[in-house]
């Protein structure tokens, strides 16, 4: 529902118009649109006003969402202020763990590396897989370091994983 009204089909546009006649639903819809724009455009200045309007909203779930964001205000502000994201790295870690689990304990480093390498071919790297200045190849190297960490010490902590990724830079 955060898609612009002009991109909706006629039936969906009429339904949205009908639904938004309720003031609470309209407020939730407007705040959701503003939040999406704020996140996409990294507009940090609008965060305080948006959080205040969430907390004073008549929708209880929206109030809770605003309170939770306010509890982690520094992280939310940093996420909006920077263009960097660790989403791609976390996705690679999750994918490697999934592959390791699928191998039912047979995941020695050489076999696991072979399986990950065959699933990550260079021609499959899309433009959307680039984050800031970090290329897909660098993320691939980081994921190989994480594979090594997971195979050598399966119960390693996230700080160990972060150290492994820093070593690859």
Image (cartoon, helix red, strand yellow):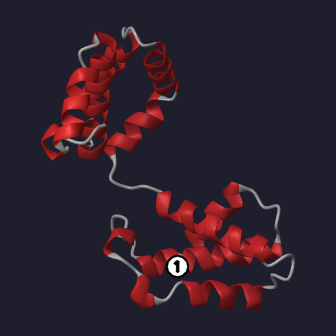
Task: Return the residue found at the far front.
Answer: 11
To which residue does mark 1 refer?
Answer: 140
Say which residue appears at 16% left-offset and 40% top-offset.
Answer: 10
Disc 1, SS: helix
Asked if residue 49 shows in the view, the reply is no
Q: Which of 3/79 is in front?
A: 3
Say which residue appears at 50% left-offset and 18% top-offset.
Answer: 64
Q: Is residue 81 left or right of residue 4?
A: right
Circle count: 1
* Quadrant occupied by the N terminus: top left
Q: Residues within 10 Å of mark 1 (few under 14, many from 20)?
A: some
Q: Is residue 13 left or right of residue 69?
A: left
* Image position of 20 with respect to 88: above or below: above
Which quadrant of the view contains residue 144?
bottom right
Residue 146's spot in the image, x, y percent? 66, 72
Residue 156's spot in the image, x, y percent? 78, 61
Say which residue appears at 27% left-offset and 46% top-offset.
Answer: 40
* Image position of 96 with respect to 64: above or below: below
Q: Which of 44/167 is in front?
A: 44
Which quadrant of the view contains residue 119?
bottom right
Q: Is residue 96 left or right of residue 40?
A: right
Task: Return the residue found at the far left.
Answer: 6
Say which residue appears at 30% left-offset and 38% top-offset.
Answer: 36
Q: Is residue 7 left or right of residue 153?
A: left
* Image position of 55 with respect to 1: above or below: above
Asked if residue 79 shows in the view, the reply is yes
Residue 13's spot in the image, x, y percent? 19, 35
Which quadrant of the view contains residue 63?
top left
């Amino acid at each position: 529902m955060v898609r612009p009204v002009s991109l909706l089909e006629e039936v969906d546009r009429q339904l949205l118009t009908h639904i938004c006649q309720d003031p609470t639903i309209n407020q939730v819809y407007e705040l959701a649109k503003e939040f999406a724009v704020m996140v996409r455009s990294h507009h940090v200045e609008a965060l305080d006003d948006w959080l205040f309007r969430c907390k004073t909203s008549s929708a209880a779930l929206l109030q809770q969402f605003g309170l939770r964001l306010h509890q982690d205000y520094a992280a939310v502000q940093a996420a909006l202020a920077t263009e960097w994201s660790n989403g791609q790295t976390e996705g690679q870690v999750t994918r490697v763990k999934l592959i390791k689990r699928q191998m039912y304990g047979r995941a020695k480093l050489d076999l696991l590396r072979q399986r990950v390498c065959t699933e990550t071919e260079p021609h499959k790297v899309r433009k959307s897989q680039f984050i800031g200045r970090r290329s897909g190849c660098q993320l691939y190297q980081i994921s190989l370091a994480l594979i090594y960490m997971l195979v050598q010490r399966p119960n390693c902590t996230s700080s160990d994983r972060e150290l492994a990724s820093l070593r690859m830079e």
